[in-house]
Amino acid sequence: MLISLDDRASELGAEVGVFGGSGFYEFLDDATDVEITTPYGPPAAPIAIGTLGGRRIAFLARHGRRHDYAAHRVPFQANMWAMASLGVRSIVAPCSVGSLQPEIHPGELVVIDQLVDRTNGRHDTFHDVGADDGMPGSDTAVHHQTFAEPYDRGLRNALTAAGATLDDVTVRPSGTMVVINGPRFSTKAESVWFRQMGWHVVNMTGYPEAVLAAEAGIPYASIALVTDYDAGVDGHEPVTMNAVFAMVQQNVDNVRRLITAALPHLPA
């Protein structure tokens, strides 16, 4: 069912927002689709509001439900504005990543604690417009966002503790994610450099999502599902999109289980 936000906004309030990527589209029970208009254009898809683990969840497919947007074309500002307009108190953001380190294996989950931005040309702030768009601090004044800790410690702790209850899933408590522009995968030279820098996983959508959440004042955490070894890890075939999608489908339920286990410890 597709409804306008204005029709039943008070009844559709969600406590936790979830941004999902490739393969994470079917996440909720009893979902209702909500179309939201933002000053930055439409979000990538209607927001589905439903239940998971007894909590009200707002889910947005960041690429669109049919993978309509490549990573460098995702409407990050519209996505975040739409989620914030629902009043969510925290955001958990699953994403697919490639491993840069041989000891981090496909199928594992990583609760990301640091980020390196290697993107270019992305709209990564709400503070470069003059219109009142409803976001905290949205004006024409210069704003420098504190971003030393890109991911909320309380959310990370909740996810890590929940991961310890899942006997058959490896959930790593920390890791640095380097975000590339895409849509291409890394060259081997780039991947070797990322590995030598000590970074752990590589992704295409982690930025600017995290900083926009920070500007919006919403605690944010990322769960990285390792789908492959990146090109700089010796002894493995170069990654393909089909291989990534297949690994997501095999492991998406583990992501759902982790989020469900963490929900009782997230802000109400």
Image (cartoon, grey):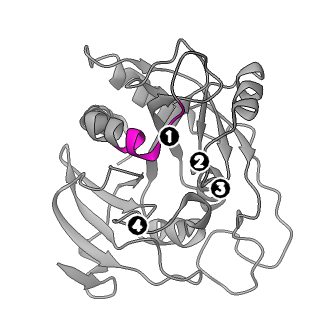
Residue 253 picture location, percent across and down: 24, 37
Contact between labelled residues 4 and 3, with CB atoms less than 8 Å apart: no
Earlier residue among tags 1 and 4 = 4
The residue beneath circle 2 is 206
The residue under label 3 is 208
User: At which x and y percent is residue 69?
Assistant: 49, 67
Disc 3 marks a residue whose amino acid type is Pro
Marks 2,1: beta carbons within 8 A: yes
Quadrant position of residue 83: bottom left
Camera-side residue of 39 and 194: 194
Amino acid at the residue labelled 2: Gly
Using the image, tell me which numbered label, if any, was put on residue 222. Answer: 1
Q: Which residues are magenta?
A: 238-245
Residue 166 placement (x, y as % from top left): 27, 19
SS for callout 2: helix
Is 227 positioned to the left or the right of 65 in the image? right
Q: Residue furthest right?
A: 142
Depth check: 80 or 132 in front?
80
In 3D space, how far apart are the residues under numbered discs 1 and 3 (Cα atoms)? 13 Å
Residue tagged by mark 4?
64
